Amino acid sequence: MNNEKIIYADKILLADGWNQDKTLTINNGIITSIDSGYLKGAEHVKGPVIPGMINCHSHAFQRAFAGFSEQGSEGQDSFWTWRKIMYKFLAQLTCQNAEIIARQLYIEMLKMGYTRVAEFHYLHHEINGDNHPSLAAMAEALFKAATTSGIGLTMLPVLYRFSGFGAQAPNDSQKRFINSTEQFNQLVSECFKLSKNHRNTNIGIAPHSLRAVDKKSLEQAVNHVRALDKHAPIHIHIAEQQKEVEDCLNHYGQRPVEWLLDNMTLDEQWCLIHATHINEQERQGIIKSRAIAGICPTTEANLGDGIFPTTEFLAEGGTFAIGSDSHISVNPIEELRWLEYAQRLIKQQRAILASSQELSVGANLWKKAAMGGAQSTNSNTGELSVGKQADLVVLDSQQTRLFAHSNQHLLDSMIFASQNTPVRDVMVNGQWVILAGHHQDENATANAFADILDVLSA
Ligand SMILES: [Zn+2]
């Protein structure tokens, strides 16, 4: 269906760094050659080109109540009060609404430079908790939203069994999330079938957290998905809150990451979401296992979770990806800015997350987050080179000319000094999905989304 595209860029961030005057030939979504100079017939893009960013952690429906829980309550507000608001909201959310909310979100992501999203999907059942006629009905709504928006999707159905450590029975607000392990594995198989009919999608799983699964169900779910795809991504919420660490210590006598490292065989397609509260041994254990740290800086700040030890983790060779999680911000620039700023505030130093190979903090973070994101989604993305998928972002030269635009400083200026997003055009899998800052369905989708919001927040 997709024929050849040829684009020419004055400036492009390739795997080996910034290059000038390059022509990319793209066939069926894949970069098939990168040539020096302008090739006749190439489309001349209107600014510097960088790899698209991968969003490693999304709960799409949460976009619809972003900003709803910022009302003070004498310093008592926390993750757990936010969760109560989420549960109340969920009690009204239908499958049809979920698709529109996700489409709105995915268009917003594309406009900000995210080209692929990993959907940590736990809203499985009807409002009353009954199964949909198809177990994957809610997942299918997200597949459709991804396909119609044009974003790449890694679907991670969530295994959610219990409300707390020790196989505590789920409470009423959690009834839409719960599956037996057998039913969950059936859902995963159905998602593999759906993926075949939706371009640029793939499947992994997400055991929700150690409080929501036990060892046996975790092993059964991992074995099932890895039998279907031996590189399937496995994501888990791991140590977001101190309370979670304490509960885990009380139940298992071990901290969450410590327990996971001792009880499961982690590899480079495991992604530990919010490994926020870890000690030095756990940090080194994650790096040794080659698992990825999935960090969500704006959500973790918004929920008052804590700060991941990014400086030490990167210095010791750890791999990370970024996610927008609750969608309090849908902007990779802001995630990376806060990733660095949190470290500066703790350490009272500057320009921390650079490396000896890449002195620019901005370039270092963008490249590493994109590569880590590609690994976390087991997708052929994350950098621009021959054989990779053509997922790319064109920055608006009208904006980049207003900040330091030498190659060395361009991404630093973008991350730390841009007041509006400089993202102009976005290509996913060889198709333009954002042109001059716009998506073809943005108005119709925004209207439908606003209508839903009126009803849900009434
Ligand atoms: Zn999450």
Image (cartoon, rainbow, N blue to C red):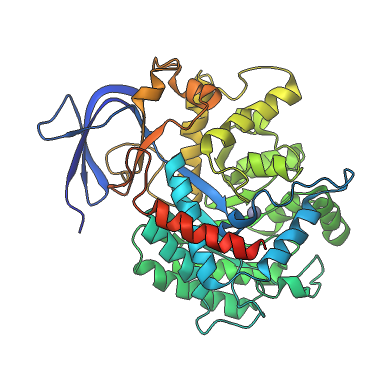
The image quadrant where one finds ligand 1 is: bottom right
Q: Residue 60 placed where, x, y %?
A: 56, 57
Q: Quadrant of residue 85?
A: bottom right
Any part of residue 300 in sight: yes
In which image quadrant can residue 121 be found?
bottom right
Name the side, left or right, on which 104 lies relative to 177: left
Give the residue at x 71% y 67%: 213
Q: Position of residue 288 (x, y in %)?
A: 61, 42
Task: Give above or below for 61 relative to 6.
Answer: below
Q: Name the foreground residue: 208 vs 60.
A: 60
Where does residue 6 sit, x and y in percent of width and height? Answer: 18, 39
Which sits in the foreground, 25 or 284?
25
* For residue 326, above or below residue 353: below
Displayed quadrant of residue 167: bottom right
Count all numbered tags in the image, as a single digit.
0
| Residue 144 relative to residue 95: left or right | left
Horizontal and vertical percent position of residue 54? 47, 45
Where the C terminus falls, by quadrant? bottom right
Q: Is residue 362 above or below residue 302?
A: above
